[in-house]
Amino acid sequence: MAKDRAGLKRMVAMTGQYGVPVILVGERAMVGWNPKEFERLLHV
């Protein structure tokens, strides 16, 4: 159970998912870990 209910609601609204980790790069979010996707987000 999430301790920060407001944070959980924001995360689900942003990503449509409950997965972790959620990595934010600017306004973009990545759920889970994918090195290639992370590099893409950094360089867009």
Image (cartoon, helix red, strand yellow):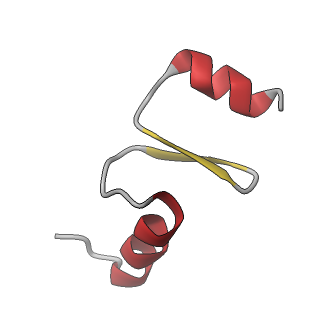
The picture quadrant where one finds residue 43 is top right
- Which residue is painted at 30% across and 57% down in the image? 18
Find the residue positioned furthest to the right: 44
In-front residue for pair 3/33: 33
Q: How many numbered dots are placed on residues in this image?
A: 0
Residue 13 image position (x, y, % from top left)? 47, 71
The picture quadrant where one finds residue 1 is bottom left
Compared across the picture, whether 29 is left or right of 44 comes to: left
Compared across the picture, whether 41 is left or right of 44 comes to: left
Vertical placement of 13 versus 34: above or below? below
Find the residue positioned furthest to the front: 16
Find the residue positioned furthest to the left: 1
- Which residue is painted at 42% across and 83% down in the image? 6
- Which residue is painted at 76% across and 52% down in the image? 26
In-front residue for pair 12/2: 12
Residue 40 image position (x, y, % from top left)? 71, 24
Residue 19 image position (x, y, % from top left)? 31, 49
Find the residue positioned furthest to the bottom: 6
Residue 44 image position (x, y, % from top left)? 83, 32
- Which residue is painted at 27% across and 75% down in the image? 3
